[in-house]
Structure formats: structure tokens, C-alpha cells
Image (cartoon, rainbow, N blue to C red):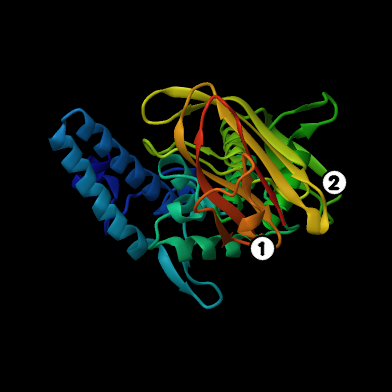
Amino acid sequence: WIPWQFDHANITGAKNGALFTTGESAGGKGYSVYPDTVCMDALFAFAKMADSIGETQSATLWRDRAEKMHEAIPENYLIDDPKYGRVWTLKDAGWPNKSTVLGPLIFTADTKGFAPSDDDPAWHAANEAAYQRMIDTYKPFGFYGWAMGYGQGFVTQSALLLDRMKDATTMLNWTAREVYDPQIDSFVVPEGVQVTPDGHYIYRTGDQGNGVQEAEIVKTMRLIVGVDDTQPRRLRIFPRMPYGWSEIGASDYPVFDGRDMAHINYSLHRTGTGADAGINFTVGADRDLGPVVLRVGPFADQPAVAAVRVNGKTPAHAAVEHSGDSWWVRWTQDVSRTAIAGSRGD
């Protein structure tokens, strides 16, 4: 269907390697980076699927069109902004916060991975600029709930994927406020939320429990948990615990390691304060998973590698890295039925 639209441009309106979209993701009708990017990603993924079963003709067709779209997308949608530099255009950007421009960033978590380096390197600067423009535009800071999934979900996911954890902490506090209904003492994702200018009062609008909006909030939670099995035989656990949170955990969490399904259990706890602050991380599985890349954080201040302990020892090749607005510790460790513990202090 996607190649067909380009082959019949006189009917579909496709031009300059871009799709003409009639729908919300293009502001009703127009040309938008969001639908083009998700269709491009889909074609690359379909090509992999076709290759895996020997359908080489389809794989070639789909990959060729996806590569052409990869060239056309920046040509059609990148502009030079006097404040933000090269950034995705807001023309025909859909949804209340014009959050479709975050698509090239947040889609990568579905097909490539949860690390900041997993987005397209040629588009990374534009993704960061689009995010910065977004958070500069809407007040109060951290509230994007006019549309819960397309707004609050998309922007919070972007903050997490960029490791902007100070931003994400504020956004998640808003998210909790928006989805918690004290009348029923439960969490229900509304279609949207209205807020007073001073930010003191909110009102949930539209569907209560809207599935599309809810899905993006669930994806946000998945990024916090950080169990990343998007690539075969490259299992990673990258939890992102917001500042001010004391613990997160996962129980019986399903994961595919490229061979078979397994289930992971882990817990992450903040310990101490000030110079004694640290994080304890315990992780195990219902079967041996072999080497898994682990990353723990965020830390406000740069930690020392010597402070990292896994089963009482400093792991080989442990690295301290700065990403986004925070510090992180990364290492590779065999994860087995016997839980391992990583403990770090500042």
C-alpha cells in the first residue's frame, strides 16, 4: 500500500518522496514527518521479516522505498529556525501540542532500542531541537495533557529517551496527577486534561480510559522499567528512575533474548543521601540469560567506577557516562537464575 501510493501519485497526492496524509497526524490533511517516519520504519521492519522467510523480491521492494523515504524526509520536513537551528517543521503538524514532530525520536524505542544513541544519528540534533522547542512552548512546564497520549505521553517518552531526567521527573509527576482519579481511588487515563493557568486545578475530558491515549502512558512506564529486547541477542536493562523516587521494580516481566522467552525480576532502590547516596540494583531471571548490558541511574553528580559493586566486586569494563542531564553507570553482566546485585554510591 505504501509503495502503491508513490506509484499512483496522481491519485494519492504523494510528491517529492513524501506521503500525503488525510488524518490527525497531518493536521487533517497535509505532509507530516510523523506518518512518513512510521511508514518508513514499518517498511524497513517488513523487509527484515520478508528476508527471514526468503521473500527477497518483497524485501527488496520495501527496503528500496524505505531508503528513498529516509532521504526524502529531511529534505521535506527540516527547516532552519533562528532559535533552534535545524528542526522538524510545524507545518501540518497534528494534535493539540503539535507533538507529531517527536515521532522520529519516540518510534526508535519500538524498533531499535531504548538508549539515547538508538535514534537516527543524522536526525539526532533535529530531534533534540524539536524536543526543546516543545518544552519551551507550553506552560506550565511538564504539563502536556491536552491530549494524554499524543501530548503527555509523547513528550515524557522523549524526555526519557534523551535522558533528560530532571525534565522527566516533573512530567511524570504531572502524569500521575492527571491519571489518578480520587473519586474511584484508581488510575484511569483520560483522553485529555484541562488545566488552569496557574496549574492548581485540572479537569479530565473526553473518554475516561481511552485506549489510544492509555497505550502511550503504558509505553512511558515501559521506558522507566527499561527492559529492552528490541534487537535479537542484544538484551539490555536500562531503568530510568526519576529523581525523588525511592524504588522501582519489575516482577515476572516477559523478555525475548533472541532464542526463547524468559521472565525477569528486578528491584532498584535509592540508598543514603548526600555523599552516601547510591542505588542498589538486584536482577535475576527464571533461566540463564547470559551477558546482559545493564545501566543504572540517574545520578546528579559524577560517580566513581570504584564505587560500583556487583556481587561484592567491581565489574570489569564498568563505565561512567554522562547523558542528557545526568550521570549513569553501565556494565555487562551474566544474568542467571541467581539474582545479582549492583550497588553504587556517589
Q: Which residue is mark 2?
A: 201
**Residue 238 appears anywhere in the view:** yes
Q: How far across and down, in percent of the image, does residue 299 sit? A: 68, 56
Q: How far across and down, in percent of the image, does residue 195 sit? A: 78, 48
Q: Residue furthest front?
A: 313
Q: Is residue 234 left or right of residue 278?
A: left
Q: Callout 1: few (<14), some (14-19), or many (20+) C-alpha neighbours within 10 Å?
A: some
Q: Nearer the viewer, residue 248 or 283?
A: 283
Q: Which residue is mark 1?
A: 302
Q: Callout 2: few (<14), some (14-19), or many (20+) C-alpha neighbours within 10 Å?
A: few
Residue at the (24%, 54%) spot, across then down: 68
Q: Nearer the viewer, residue 106 or 151?
A: 106
8 w.r.t. 162: above or below:
above
Q: Is residue 322 left or right of residue 197?
A: left
> Tag 2's secondary structure?
loop
Q: How far across and down, in percent of the image, does residue 263 sit? A: 53, 24
Among the 4 quarters of the image, the one containing residue 23:
top left
Among the 4 quarters of the image, the one containing residue 145:
top right
In 3D space, how far apart are the residues under numbered discs 1 and 2 (Cα atoms)?
38 Å
Q: How far across and down, in percent of the image, does residue 33 sit? A: 42, 54
Q: Nearer the viewer, residue 227 or 143?
A: 227
Among the 4 quarters of the image, the one containing residue 121:
bottom left
Please identify the quadrant where the N terminus is shown.
top left
Please identify the quadrant where the C terminus is shown.
bottom right
* Earlier residue among tags 1 and 2: 2
**Disc 2 residue type?**
Tyr
> Tag 1's secondary structure?
loop
Residue at the (45%, 61%) spot, across then down: 124
Q: Is residue 69 left or right of residue 98?
A: left
**Disc 1 residue type?**
Gln
Which numbered marker is on residue 312?
none
